[in-house]
Amino acid sequence: MGVNTVLPSAVWLPFGARILRARSDKGLSRAELAATVGVSDDKLGEVESARCRPARSLVERVDNALGTEHQLVDAWAVALQAEAFPNEFGDLRELTVHAPEVWETQPVVIPPFLRTREYSWAVLRPSYFDLSDDEVEAMVEEEMSLRAAMTGPDGPSLRVVLNETVLRRPQGGAEVLNAQRGFLADLVAAGIVRLGMIPEKSPRHPELGGPFRLMEYGDRSPIVYAFAAQGGELITDAEQVLRCSMVRDAIEEVTVELTPESEILSARWPEG
């Protein structure tokens, strides 16, 4: 009988990383924790790298050993449910950060992980008019934290395609828009993101079906997150993911590659 080499879904990657962080915070080596919970070093390594689905009994022992007060068991239950019912997975940030390659299309706004702080405020404040400034500031801080993780040295390879309107809409006013354009130009110049644009005059706009994020994990099946007005939908079904990949290819066919010198990034509104 052959050995099953199919890896668990990528939704287990954040769970494995959570165990690794908890162990590191406790100051334990992997071998020390493995000995404490009664498994081999290699087995614990498979759990931390999400190369296997751990049994609940093992997670409970790890939870007790690390003193994480049932948090790991709760996270295990979330991952288990997300694999069976992917729409229930709520930690898109962790899932995105753990993807080696991320492709995203946005026809309305700059993605959160590429925003300046001022642009983030300009997007969130009117969208959450019922929240206090402190609550909005907390959301802005969360976006800045995501930006640091996504654009840092350990972040994924980023490819983003924007509708031309996104780069011309003066969200927050001229100063905010111009600073955002300059920030994107700097990211492109540094090789942190490959940025493309669908011109408004293009007769074909395949991204009108809505914004989505395609996350690829190398030896694991890719995952798509389709954005909605509130929240979104996590897609793991192979046929649906394939369709999104085909839409991605169609978008790339009409995309214009942007450089730091591209007019849309270097010009200043309202003059250009």
Image (cartoon, rainbow, N blue to C red):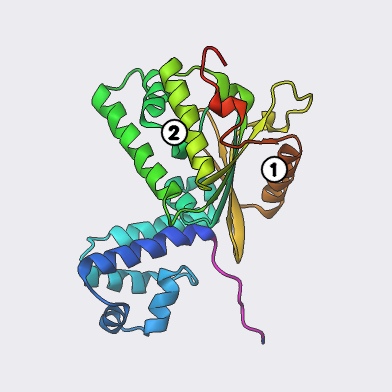
Compared across the picture, whether 105 is left or right of 87 comes to right
In the image, what residue occupies the spot 52% across and 55% down? 99
Please say whether residue 6 is one of the residues in the magenta stretch.
yes
Q: What element carries label 1?
A: helix
Query: In the rendered view, would you say 8 is above or below 244?
Result: below
Mark 2 residue element: loop
Residue 201: percent from left, percent from top: 74, 21
Quarter of the C terminus within the rendering:
top right
- Percent from the top left, x then y, of residue 75? 36, 57
Q: Which amino acid lies under the numbered mark 1 shown in the image of this protein? A: Arg
Per the model, the C-alpha gap separating discs 1 and 2 is: 22 Å
Name the residue: 38% across, 77% down.
Answer: 44
Decide: is 183 above or below 159: above
Q: Position of residue 245 (x, y in %)?
A: 70, 47
180 relative to 202 in the view: left or right: left
Magenta segment boundaries in residue numbering: 2-9
Q: Label 1 crowding class (10 Å Cα cut-off): few <14, some 14-19, many 20+?
A: many
- Amino acid type indicated by mark 2: Arg
Q: Which of 229 and 94 is in front in this view?
A: 94
Compared to residue 249, the image places residue 182 above or below, namely above
Residue farthest to the top?
270
Residue 115: mark: 2
Read off the residue under disc 1.
248
- Disc sitting over residue 54 in the figure: none
Write down the quadrant of residue 35 in the picture.
bottom left
Q: Which of 250 and 223 is in front in this view?
A: 250
